[in-house]
Structure formats: C-alpha cells, structure tokens
Image (spheres, grey):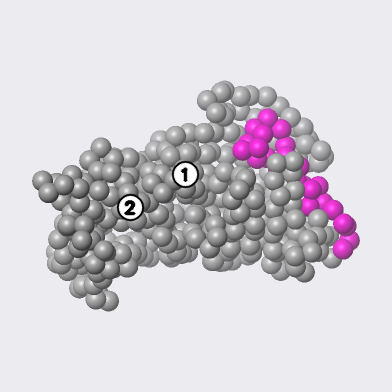
C-alpha cells in the first residue's frame, strides 16, 4: 500500500550527509526585457548531434553539439559534464556516485545564486518517469543587474535522484526548455541503462506523480527488495514542492525504509524528513516482540526515545498484509471497517497512528482512510495496492496517481 504521510519527500540514503551541489555559474547579463519573451520560446532541432563521454570504464553516447568536457571531482564524488548545444551556454550535468535528495538539491542550487540575482518566478513545470524512476524539471525566472539596468534570464534545472548514478543538470540561458529536458533526460537514461545492477533484487517498483489542480508538485517511488537470503525491505522515497509564493516554495524530502520479518510484519522502520535541505525528523522504531516497539531519534530538534505498544498482537502489519486485507476483506464486504495501525512520525513520533478504513461511495474499488488529522480517498488495483489517492492538506487538495508499475508486491 502506498505510504500515507502528510509530509512526503526524497532523502538520499536517509542517514547520509547531504550531497554537496555545485552552484550554477555566475549569470551573464540577460537580453533586454523587450526581447526576453521571444527568446523564451526558442527550441532546437530533435537532436543537436552525438558525442561520446567516459564515465568510469563506460563509453556512453550522449546528445551534444560538440566535444563534451568532463571534470571529475573525487572529493564531492561526482563527474561534471558540459554538453554544448551550439548556443551561448552549455548544459551542465553532474553524475553522482551516491544518492541525492531531489528537493534539497534543487533548493541548494537556487539558494546558491540568490546573492547574484533576484528570483522573479519559480515553478516545477514537469515530472516524468525516466528509466522507471522519477525526474523533476524546474524553471527559475530571474532578474540580474547590468550596466543597462535590470535584465531578465531563465535558469532551468533537472534532477534524476533515483536512477543508478543520480544526475543533476542545469542550463542558464533563455529558451530551449524542451531541448534542455531532452538532453538531460537522454544523459540520465544512458547512464542508468549502462550502470551494472548490484545489491538486493527489486521485486516490485512503482512511481506516482503528485498534482494540485492538475499541476505537478512532486512524486513518490516505492520499491520492494529482497536479499539473497530472503530478507525483504520496502523503501519509499518522495518529494513535494509546495509553493509559498510565486518566488518561494517548501521542498520536502522524505524517506521511509521498512524491514519485514518472515511473516510480513515490520521489524524495523526508519523515517527521515528534510525541508529545504534542513532535517525535520529522523526516527527509528524497532520491534521487540509481541506488541512492543522502541523508538529513538530526533524530531523538530528534540531527542526522543521510549517504547509503545500496538493493538495488534504481533505489531505493525507490512504493506502487503494491509493490501491483502483491503482486497480480501474490505472490498469483498466480509468486514465493513478495518482499523490499521501505522507508524507515521509526521503525525506522532511516539505512538502508533490508527487509520479507520472503510469502503467509499466514490468508486467500486475506492476506500477512505481517516485519522483525527486527515482523510484519504484511495482507488485500489487488483492486488489491493493504490492506483490513486486524494488527500486534503489544509486548503490544498493533493492528488497522486501511479504512472509506473513493475513486478508484483510479495
């Protein structure tokens, strides 16, 4: 079942330090304001050419209008590639060794140039699925001082946080919005396809896109994995970009990693949330047998530790058990209500949260899940997993819809 959180987001490996993001170059004087609107519509041909780059031992073909400069940075564990478009500025891309957080990466990049320019507009203009993983594309309109006065510019950003060797790209030149998206996506795709598979086997993976009034605001990836000895894990990585004003937003990254015992109950769960790159909470619950769990970590700057008991005799049920109960008991009419316990530190970090779950009149496979703080409407698939959810976050109605599915939950 898709994770149910008020604050959702993508934190690299949860407990690792933030990955440093190189700042964009100093903006060049932008064209005169009367020319800017016309320049913003510029695009390039379907391909500007092809070049080879070297990433480790791999030779990769990418889109570029000329030779690609590569600048390895061993200290910060990335390789920078400058991909020429045949225009004034190249596309800069950074290919990382370690996971990166989408929201924090974008936020740090924007913050790093605010002392050199004035942000005039800010929007997440697209969320796509690339190689089975989410990708976010951001447009920053800005004003910069010049000898002739204020001039306008456009900074474009793209982040591919969940592919092997994550990629972050930027382009500081008015126009070429779709061209930038294509060049960055092709690079991330060839890097992902060429990366050798390692680690636990992924048995199930989904990507959902979040929207508000039809506009993209974020995404979520759910992945079930199994190690060679049969140990199962579920990871949920998500990011939301919630506007505060036309020039500011709250970028929230969250990661949830759950370990399951042999029967599908949660033996441990870590939840980490970051807002604009700043840690909000990092909590770990561990099953001590029966109903007993211990919790420890940091929430809103406070150290917390203690124990609590679940109502269920064997602790928190894992996602697959919950989905099967929805499918086999609630949707079939065997029961009219399911009371499901979840550990959601967004709502309370020191106790379980109970979701009262019932059928919904909005559709034949729709259910509503309710707590004292929120209500969620979910549409389920044949496995009892959610295809779409709607949740009211204060004045904002957040719609999430699954856009990618691979494998089956087990």
Give how far across and how far down residue 59 sits, in percent: 24, 64
Q: Is residue 137 above or below residue 27?
A: below
In-image side of 225 versus 156 (left or right): right
- Residue depicted at x 47% and y 44%: 244
Quadrant where the N terminus lies?
bottom right
- Residue depicted at x 75% and y 65%: 362
| Residue 336 falls within the magenta-colored stretch | yes
Count of marks overlaid on the render: 2
Highlighted range, magenta: 333-357
Report if residue 321 is visible in the image: no
Q: Which residue is mark 2?
A: 140
Report if residue 392 is visible in the image: yes
In-image side of 157 versus 298 (left or right): left
Cα distance between the residues tagged 2 and 1: 15 Å
Give how far across and how far down residue 262 sits, in percent: 70, 48
Q: Which residue is mark 1?
A: 244
In-image side of 28 versus 301 (left or right): left
Q: Is residue 249 above or below residue 217?
A: above
């Amino acid at each position: 079942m898709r994770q149910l959180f008020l604050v959702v987001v993508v934190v690299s490996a949860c407990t690792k330090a933030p990955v440093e993001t190189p700042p964009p170059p100093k903006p060049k004087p932008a064209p005169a304001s009367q020319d800017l609107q016309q320049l913003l519509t510029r695009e390039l041909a379907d391909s500007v050419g092809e070049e080879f780059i070297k990433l480790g031992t791999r030779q990769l073909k990418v889109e570029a209008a000329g030779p690609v400069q590569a600048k390895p940075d061993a200290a910060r564990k990335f390789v920078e590639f400058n991909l020429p478009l045949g225009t004034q500025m190249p596309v800069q891309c950074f290919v990382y060794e370690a996971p990166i957080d989408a929201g924090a990466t974008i936020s740090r990049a924007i913050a790093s140039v605010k002392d050199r320019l004035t942000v005039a507009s800010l929007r997440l203009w697209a969320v796509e699925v690339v190689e089975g993983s989410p990708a976010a594309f951001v447009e920053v309109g800005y004003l910069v001082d010049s000898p002739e006065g204020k001039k306008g510019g456009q900074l474009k950003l793209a982040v591919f946080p969940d592919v092997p060797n994550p990629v972050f790209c930027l382009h500081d030149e008015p126009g070429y919005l779709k061209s930038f998206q294509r060049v960055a996506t092709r690079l991330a795709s060839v890097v992902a396809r060429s990366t050798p598979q390692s680690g636990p086997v992924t048995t199930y993976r989904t990507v959902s896109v979040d929207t508000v009034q039809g506009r993209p605001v974020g995404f979520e990836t759910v992945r079930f994995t199994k190690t060679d000895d049969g140990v199962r894990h579920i990871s949920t990585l998500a990011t939301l970009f919630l506007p505060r004003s036309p020039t500011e937003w709250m970028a929230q990254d969250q990661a949830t990693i759950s370990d399951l015992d042999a029967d599908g109950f949660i033996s441990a769960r870590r939840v980490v949330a970051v807002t604009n790159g700043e840690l909000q909470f990092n909590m770990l619950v561990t099953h001590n047998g029966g109903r007993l769990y211990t919790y420890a970590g940091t929430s809103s700057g406070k150290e917390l530790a203690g124990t609590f008991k679940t109502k269920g005799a064997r602790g928190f049920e894992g996602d697959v058990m919950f989905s099967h109960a929805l499918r086999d008991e609630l949707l079939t009419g065997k029961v009219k209500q399911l009371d499901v316990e979840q550990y959601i530190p967004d709502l309370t970090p020191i106790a379980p949260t109970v979701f009262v779950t019932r059928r919904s009149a909005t559709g034949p496979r729709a259910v509503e899940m309710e707590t004292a703080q929120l209500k969620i409407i979910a549409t389920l698939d044949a496995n009892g997993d959610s295809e779409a959810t709607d949740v009211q976050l204060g004045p904002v109605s957040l719609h999430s819809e699954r856009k990618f599915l691979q494998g089956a939950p087990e």
